[in-house]
Image (tube, rainbow, N blue to C red):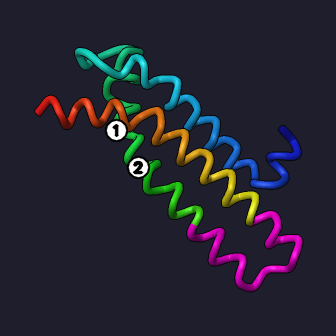
Amino acid sequence: MKKLATDVGFLRVFHGLFLLLLMVSVPFAGGESARHGFAMWPTLIAPALVPIFFFVLPLDMFMAAVSRGGATDSEVNRLNRVLKYDIVLLILLLLTWVPFFAQIITER
């Protein structure tokens, strides 16, 4: 974990952990939306955060790609690892949440 935090940065690691929390919340996202208590997380809060992170991850990837332009070789290698890390997170986020949003769209 320390190596990963050194490679991609602590904030990206926490960002990834938060995304994993979103991903494990998807099985509980369907059904009636809760208006109070912890049940609000999977039914209201997590589905609202997913589109935000869907745009934040490509933005981080874009910024890492731009930063590679004037970086040293070791920094370019680190930024390449950041790009791979973000791509994996984005793919996992899409694989877990697209069926949920597709179901919502087709039900209308």
Magenta-span inclusion, residue 70:
yes
Q: Which mark is residue 52?
A: 2
Judged from this view, the residue extending furthest toward the left is: 108
Distance of mark 2 from mark 1, alpha carbons? 7 Å
Mark 1: few, some, or many residues within 10 Å (few <14, many ≥20)? few
**Label pair 2/1, CB-CB below 8 angstroms:** yes
| Front position in the image: 28 or 41 | 28
| Front position in the image: 56 or 108 | 108
| Front position in the image: 76 or 10 | 76
- Image x and y of residue 42, in percent: 39, 23
Q: Is residue 16 left or right of residue 77?
A: left
- Image x and y of residue 99, in percent: 35, 32
Q: Which mark is residue 48?
A: 1
Residue type highlighted by circle 2: Ile
Find the magenta span and give its range: 62-79
Task: Residue at 26% x, 16% y: name it.
Answer: 31
Q: Does 27 sit above or below residue 73?
A: above
Q: Main secondary structure of the magenta part?
A: helix
Q: Does 10 sit above or below residue 21?
A: below
Placement of the C terminus among the 4 image quadrants: top left
